[in-house]
Image: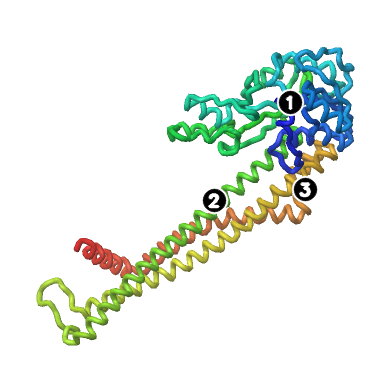
């Protein structure tokens, strides 16, 4: 099959894309060896950023596309590409994007790349994650569906999880500097959503494992001895972006639940008030039609005259009106909290969007330590120091109000009931009456 089936347009704003992460991870002006370059989408993007790119591809159609882009191109099979086929120590970065899983001996190729790397050079590779939730659930159903592209591409000879990928890199004489991931949900892969007939407990266990969302691993590695794993710019930016996106989703869900609960309680009180009002109207009509009943008693039994029932029910109506008024006030307080919450959501959204938009510029200018220091102070993503302070203030205000509203509601309700004990009696009487009506 043609390598053009792997072609993808590169959008540097899309951080959930292996090609984007590769382009951003390569410093502008680097000497790059792109092994398995396909049609040259990544190689072309790197050349546009000032890199000198040498592309290696086996497929004839891919080679033609690379030459048409004006790229230095070598046609070769990566399984048999000899160490002396390329000049030693000639490249700052060697790319192997979704390549190793197609080879007979991926470790051998990765080990050979050490000879082609200049001092301080890095290898950047990506592989699909065979432990993605879609694959796990397919196996639970007794299926292993091969596809033209993706997790279970029919041309894959090897399948990697995080541990086996780590072993592959280490055995080839490299140390992991950064481990990035591209994430996709169960509904976002090329596999049909494999959830039908799967027990709920299995679905929950898969959903709880963060690795179930990882679609591809992206590794930045250096020949041993390597530095401490992690701490690279892209890894920090990706983690920050995902953290803010997760916070945004959580806050959005909280706001929706709070608003729905408040409206439901308000509607329930309004409906109860309407029922009592209708009962009052009924009694008033009854008294108007039979004035003689107004003072009529019932002897020694427990039944009340219509006039007494009317007075009692009007008291219940007044009580419910008071309750409804208090509830509306409480909802107004909640609405103020939700307004602050929504403002915080807006800040979180702008924060994440600004972060994603500035990643290409930040990565292009280098100086990772300085940039990471700025990121910690929000200066890399907030337009001004005042904007960063506003972000922190909004978040603090939201947390304060979130706790304060619940406390005020409890305190107000407790104080109200303690100062007006007759309300308890009225509510009890109404509850008994309604319970009696429901049994008739």
The location of residue 288, given as percent across then percent down, is 23, 85
Neighbor class of circle 2 (other Cα within 10 Å; few <14, some 14-19, many 20+) is few
The structure residue drawn at horizontal position 78% and vertical position 17%, both measured from the top left corner, is 77
Q: Is residue 145 above or below residue 339?
A: above
The CA distance from mark 3 to mark 1 is 31 Å
**Dot placed on the residue nearer the N-terminal end, 3 or 1:** 1
Residue that numbered label 1 is attached to? 125
Front tag of 2 and 3: 2
Residue 379 is labelled as 3
Q: How many marks?
A: 3
The location of residue 169, given as percent across then percent down, is 71, 19
Q: Quadrant of the C terminus?
A: bottom left
Front tag of 3 and 1: 1
| Nearest the eye: 218 or 413 | 218
Neighbor class of circle 1 (other Cα within 10 Å; few <14, some 14-19, many 20+) is many
The structure residue drawn at horizontal position 75% and vertical position 51%, both measured from the top left corner, is 382
Residue 253 is labelled as 2
Quadrant of the rendered structure where residue 356 is? top right
Q: Is residue 212 left or right of residue 49?
A: left
| Nearest the eye: 67 or 275 | 67
The CA distance from mark 1 to mark 2 is 37 Å
């Amino acid at each position: 099959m043609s390598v053009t089936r792997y072609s993808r347009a590169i959008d540097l704003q899309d951080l959930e894309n292996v090609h984007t992460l590769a382009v951003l991870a390569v410093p502008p002006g680097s000497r790059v060896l792109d092994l398995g370059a396909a049609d040259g989408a990544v190689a072309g993007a790197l050349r546009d950023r000032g890199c000198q790119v040498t592309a290696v591809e086996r497929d004839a159609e891919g080679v033609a596309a690379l030459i048409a882009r004006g790229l230095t191109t070598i046609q070769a099979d990566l399984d048999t590409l000899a160490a002396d086929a390329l000049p030693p120590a000639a490249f700052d970065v060697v790319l192997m994007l979704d390549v190793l899983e197609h080879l007979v001996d991926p470790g051998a190729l990765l080990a050979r790349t050490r000879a082609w790397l200049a001092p301080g050079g890095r290898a950047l590779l990506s592989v699909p994650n065979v432990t993605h939730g879609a694959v796990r659930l397919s196996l639970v159903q007794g299926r292993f569906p091969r596809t033209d592209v993706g997790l279970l591409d029919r041309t894959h000879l090897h399948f990697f999880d995080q541990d086996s990928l780590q072993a592959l890199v280490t055995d080839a004489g490299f140390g992991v500097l950064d481990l990035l991931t591209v994430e996709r949900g169960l509904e976002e892969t090329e596999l049909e959503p494999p959830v039908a007939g799967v027990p709920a407990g299995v679905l929950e266990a898969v959903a709880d494992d963060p690795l179930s969302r990882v679609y591809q691993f992206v590794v930045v590695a250096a020949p041993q001895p390597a530095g401490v794993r992690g701490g690279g710019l892209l890894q920090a930016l990706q983690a920050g972006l995902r953290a803010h996106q997760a916070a945004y989703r959580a806050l959005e869900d909280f706001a929706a639940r709070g608003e729905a609960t408040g409206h439901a309680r308000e509607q329930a009180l309004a409906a109860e008030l309407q029922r009592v009002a209708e009962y009052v109207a009924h009694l008033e009509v009854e008294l108007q039609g039979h004035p003689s009943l107004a003072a009529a008693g019932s002897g020694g039994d427990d039944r009340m005259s219509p006039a007494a029932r009317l007075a009692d029910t009007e008291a219940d109506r007044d009580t419910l009106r008071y309750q409804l008024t208090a509830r509306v006030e409480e909802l107004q307080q909640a609405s103020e909290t939700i307004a602050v919450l929504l403002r915080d959501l807006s800040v979180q959204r702008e924060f994440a969007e600004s972060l994603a938009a500035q990643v290409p510029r930040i990565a292009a200018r280098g100086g990772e330590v300085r940039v990471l220091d700025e990121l910690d102070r929000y200066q890399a993503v907030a337009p001004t120091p005042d904007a960063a302070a506003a972000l922190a203030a909004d978040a603090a205000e939201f947390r304060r109000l979130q706790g304060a509203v619940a406390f005020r509601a409890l305190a107000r309700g407790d104080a109200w009931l303690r100062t007006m004990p007759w309300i308890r009696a009225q509510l009890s009487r109404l509850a008994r009456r309604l319970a009696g009506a429901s049994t008739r």
